[in-house]
């Protein structure tokens, strides 16, 4: 087991990639705090983890806000006694509007949930990881960080910001033995993407952006997150691990 005796937080852990990652982290021996806004899905993931003999706790928190982030970290540490792995997976994934259509409130909401959350969670997690003398922070970006699309102003800008923020965090946290990396998925079949495909009839176009002619699975991102979280990645920091089935090449 690659994450035995580790404590991990997965933000946005109630759905899609976050859910698959929380479950996989637990399968690898981690005790997992599943953080997000809606208790229902979080509790379901905790129940699934407990059903396979793992340990998990649901933490209701808006990670776009300082109080929510402090709460997520405090509850995790008081339940499990420390913090080793932070997967900043939460994002506002549904906004699809041109700049002209995007309101200031929508821009702020998307940036808060997607980029400010990474700043806040990483800021408040660091003291705990410093105490432990080790840590791994994984920030979920997207292929949209480097190949943005029409209608992706807020989302793609936030994801692009994550690439730079990750490097700054990695440089500043390196002396404390905290590794910080970006994980950039391509098209992954989560309920969120499924709904977008239905809305836009975009399945064929997305499959064409993959050398295998298919859409990825949440478990394929979870596997990459386990690698970055584990000691297998002990010399990996500042990196952007692209798991896109070839999107950026095609
Ligand atoms: N699915 C894809 O094709 C794809 C591609 C590239 C990147 N990604 C990234 O992968 C991650 C997961 O995406 P997903 O496809 O599973 O979508 P998703 O919408 O199911 O996951 C996002 C999660 O974040 C949570 N969240 C949003 N705002 C929050 C907040 N303020 N506080 C707490 N939780 C909040 C949502 O409730 C949800 O559970 C995201 O960062 C997304 O940008 C996904």
Image (tube, grey):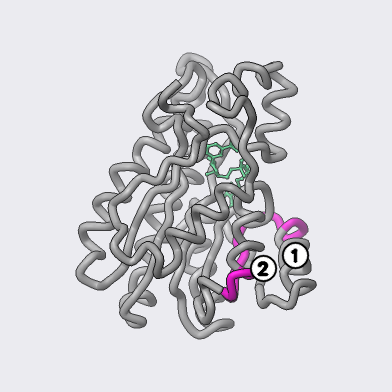
Crowding at dot 2, Cα within 10 Å, few <14 / some 14-19 / many 20+, comes out as many
Q: Is residue 122 left or right of residue 64?
A: left
- Which of the pair 143/44 is nearer the observer? 143
- Taking the magenta stretch, the answer to whether it contains residue 29 is yes
Left or right: residue 118 compared with residue 208:
left
User: Which residue in the structure is indicated by mark 2?
Assistant: 58
- 100 above or below 67? above
Q: Quadrant of residue 40?
A: bottom right
Query: Mark 1 packing: few (<14 Cα in 10 Å), some, or many (20+)?
Result: some
The residue at the point 52 percent across, 73 percent down is: 3
Q: Secondary structure at mark 2?
A: strand
Between 157 and 46, the one lying in front of the other is: 46
Q: Which quarter of the figure is the C terminus placed in?
A: top left
| Circles 2 and 1 in contact, beta carbons < 8 Å | yes
Picture coordinates of residue 31, whole percent (x, y) = 59, 76
Question: Disc 2 and disc 1: Cα gap in Å?
Answer: 6 Å
Residue bearing mark 1? 43
Label located before the other in sequence (2 or 1)? 1
197, above or below 190, in the image: above
Pick out the residue farthest to the front. Answer: 212
What's the magenta region? 26-41
Return the x and y of residue 125 as percentages of the image width and height.
40, 68
């Amino acid at each position: 087991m690659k994450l035995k005796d580790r404590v991990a937080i997965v933000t946005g852990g109630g759905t899609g990639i976050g859910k698959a990652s929380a479950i996989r982290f637990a399968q690898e021996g981690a005790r997992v705090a599943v953080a997000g806004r809606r208790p229902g899905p979080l509790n379901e993931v905790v129940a699934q983890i407990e059903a396979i003999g793992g340990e998990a706790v649901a933490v209701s928190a808006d990670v776009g806000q300082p109080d929510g982030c402090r709460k997520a970290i405090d509850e995790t540490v008081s339940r499990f006694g420390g913090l080793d792995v932070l997967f900043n997976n939460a994002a506002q994934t549904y906004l699809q509007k041109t700049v002209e259509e995007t309101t200031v409130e929508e821009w702020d909401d998307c940036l808060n949930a997607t980029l400010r959350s990474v700043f806040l969670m990483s800021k408040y997690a660091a003291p705990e990881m410093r105490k432990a003398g080790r840590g791994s922070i994984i920030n979920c970006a997207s292929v949209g960080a480097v190949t943005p699309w029409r209608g992706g102003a807020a989302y793609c800008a936030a994801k692009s910001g994550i690439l730079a923020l990750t490097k700054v965090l990695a440089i500043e946290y390196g002396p404390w033995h905290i590794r910080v990396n970006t994980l950039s998925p391509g098209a992954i079949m989560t309920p969120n993407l499924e709904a977008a495909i239905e809305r836009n009839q975009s399945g064929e176009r997305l499959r064409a952006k993959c050398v295998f002619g298919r859409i990825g699975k949440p478990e394929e991102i979870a596997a990459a997150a386990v690698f970055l979280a584990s000691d297998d990645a002990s010399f990996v920091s500042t990196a952007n691990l692209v798991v896109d089935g070839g999107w950026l090449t095609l």
